[in-house]
Amino acid sequence: MKSNPQPALRDIPIGLSANGFHRETDSMGAVDVPADRYWGAQTTRFLEHFSIGDDRMLKRIYLANGNVKEAAALVNVASGRLSEWKAEAIVRAADEAIAGKSDEHFPLYVWQTGSGTQSNMNVNEVMATGTIPLLGGEVASKTPVHPNDDVNMGQSSNDTFPTAMHIASLLELDEHLLPSIEALASRIEAKAAEWMKGVKIGRTHLQDAVPLTVGQEWSGYGQQLRDTLARARQSRTGLCELAAGGTAVGTGLNAPPHFSDEIATAIAKLTGRPFVTAPDKFAAQGSLDAMVASMSSLRGLAVALLKIANDMRWLASGPRCGLGELKLPENEPGSSIMPGKVNPTQCEAMVMVCIQVIGEDNAVAFAGSQGNFELNAMRPVVINDLLHSASVLGEACGNFPRFSVE
């Protein structure tokens, strides 16, 4: 254990309330940073150099980075590389980030370097600065906790950002999207059972065909969703493999022995998910294969949902001069010029969400093909598109049983 003198760890909320600016420095010189922000010089430079559009890195990735930094601190203190009091302070700062209490300090854009270095450095600066009120240090001094030497100990952006990507993606699937698909599938299956005796005309090539029951038709919708749910769950396996410990190029340079196994175990314990170290760090860092596979499962869900939503709006068409077989809920007026008209708005919203997801899948697939040698440097756009797709699909699937499939 290092023999650093131990400052008293103060039992106060993490936060800065000063007005004006303070002076931060990095290897390129000094910059002024708003006094009430945790970030430092590098984040300030990134905000200037990468101010492209208004697409900010999604907060879910920063919460996942909190898991990475906390796990690293726990592993480093256990190995004697980090003082206990520093580790305790970093863990406190990481917990603040995981709880969403530091969101305003993560301002960076999606469009940055392809390794996610800007986001990793932003997290390092925020975690280090977040310890200052706890340890009685001076803002902008990088003491007693240093963003690189302490918070980033044993890590590189090239392995921590891929690790955070997998954590964020898996948690988004588990906590949001998969339960929404399950609920929608169950609701459609209940309708199929309810309508199993209702005979209707079948249609192929958009022409009349032999009869079937409404329940049989809807059982097909339910099975489509069950199949996509199974594929999405299967894609979790690749996401459970973490790059942490590979450091810059996959060799583990600058990380202690067994760091990769130990940090994966710590992340698994912190998140309650079956994370393990990736068996080959060169594949984990040089490719985006697991992310591409997971995104592909979201595309499959979008394709199935698009078919279901389109069928429903066609079956509800009319209602007097169209097919008129379904009666959709009347959620809101449908026209500014035709009083009484009600449109299949939930179906249309679902179709647009699915079109968006299919487009984002194309972007992720193309980005996945752009790995060069020991790093795929297209990571920020991939995590942005996957998280966005999972989020909007989850919301759309959540709304559909409430406002369309009553």
Image: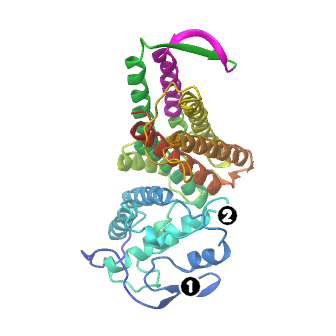
Q: Quadrant of residue 101?
A: bottom left
Q: Residue at x 41, y 18 (%)?
A: 195
Instruction: From this view, report whether residue 106 is shown above or below residue 292.
Output: below
First in sequence: mark 1 vs mark 2: 1
Q: Which mark is residue 25?
A: 1
Along the line of sight, which residue is nearer the eye, 218 or 2? Answer: 218
Q: Residue furthest left?
A: 11
**Would you call the spot at circle 1 few (<14 residues within 10 Å), some (14-19), or many (20 or more)?**
some
Helix, strand or loop at label 1? It is: strand
Helix, strand or loop at label 2? It is: loop
Q: Position of residue 1 (x, y in %)?
A: 36, 65
Chief secondary structure of the magenta portion: helix
Instruction: From this view, report whether residue 171 is shown above or below residue 116.
Output: above
Q: Position of residue 370 (x, y in %)?
A: 74, 49
Give the magenta-colored segment's residue range.
206-234
- Inspect the image, locate mark 2, and give the three-letter code of the amino acid beneath it: Thr
Q: Quadrant of the C terminus?
A: top left
- Inspect the image, locate mark 1, and give the three-letter code of the amino acid beneath it: Thr
Along the line of sight, which residue is nearer the eye, 126 or 202? Answer: 202
**Residue 71 lies in magenta, yes or no?**
no
Q: Dot 2 corresponds to which residue?
A: 113
